[in-house]
Amino acid sequence: MAAGAAMAQDAAKPTTAATPATAAPATAEAAAKPGDATAGQAKAAACGACHGMDGNSTDPQYPKLAGQSEQYIVHQLENFKSGRRQNPIMLGMATPLSEQDMHDIGAYFASKTALPGVADQALVEHGQQLFREGDVKRGIPACMACHSIDGRGNPGAMYPQLQSQHAQYVQATLKAWHDGSSWGTDAHSQIMPAIAQKLDTNDIAALASYVEGLHPATDADLRKPAASP
């Protein structure tokens, strides 16, 4: 009401009256600005203690963020900040971040490359079958349908990159979903809990190991016996 009265009084002053109207769109555009990896490097300094300065964590309880899409990282930071995804440490880290901070941090880690891991050869066959084919009889879809055959994910659909992720982290996450955890109530957040509940302990261990060894082939890989998928 007060803003409307002020605009009516200043009808003869179009320049002054237009100022409030143009300020909001400018702010919205700034909030939606794509991430800046250079700015994100400084903002991500605190993340390095757990996730590694280049997004390759050395402690397998913390996920690798290198190569993860900006969109997915932003979405998860928003989940932590809102409390939809419960984690006391990440709640504290995400709470002071603005939307632009999240995009910049996401862009920084997206610009990095995940270092390859190694799968347990004894688990590769089972893990590969589930990842590439799923299990029709048990209603388990192939992981690659959403996460792509090389585990790079689908940024547009916000399906995360899985390649080279720590088996320990993947195993813990799948088990949490299997046991009833979820990161929200929307349809998208219910996809993985519903799938994980159909996996048994052996399935989870095999998939986690397979994912850790999943990475693009390099010249070095072609010159040595395969130790990972």
Image: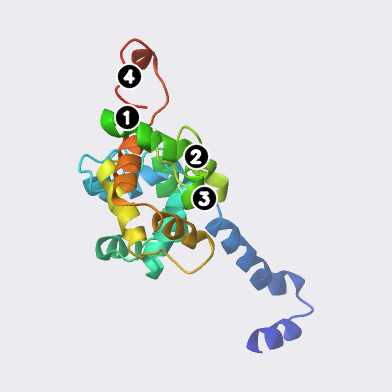
Q: Is residue 207 above or below residue 190?
A: above
Which of the two discs, 2 and 3, labels the residue nearer the N terminus?
2
Q: Which residue is mark 3?
A: 158
Residue 63 appears at what percent x and percent y?
30, 46
4 or 1: mark nearer the eye: 4
For badge 3, the amino acid type reads: Met
Compared with 117, 192 (above or below) is: below
Q: Which image quadrant: the C terminus?
A: top left
Considering depth in this image, is 28 or 159 the residue closer to the camera? 159
Q: Is residue 71 visible?
A: no
Crowding around mark 3 (Cα neighbors within 10 Å: few <14, some 14 to 19, many 20+) is: some
Crowdedness near tag 1: few (<14), some (14–19) or many (≥20) residues, C-alpha within 10 Å: some
Badge 3 element: loop
- For image coordinates 28% across by 52% down, the residue present is 172
Q: How many marks?
A: 4
Pointers 2 and 4 in contact (C-beta within 8 Å): no
Quick check: can you spot residue 136? Answer: yes
Residue 215, quarter of picture: top left
**Location of residue 212 in the rendering, given as x and y in whole percent from the top left corner:** 32, 36
- Which of disc 4 and disc 2 is earlier in sequence? 2
- Residue type, mark 1 in image: Pro
Q: Earlier in the sequence, mark 2 or mark 1?
A: 1
Which of 90/124 is in front? 124
Q: Secondary structure at mark 1?
A: loop
Distance from label 2 to label 1 (Cα)? Answer: 18 Å
Tell me how far mark 1 sits from mark 3, CA to CA. 22 Å
* Discs 1, 3 touching: Cβ within 8 Å: no
Q: Quadrant of residue 219?
A: top left
Q: Find the distance from the CA under tag 4 to the CA under tag 3.
A: 31 Å
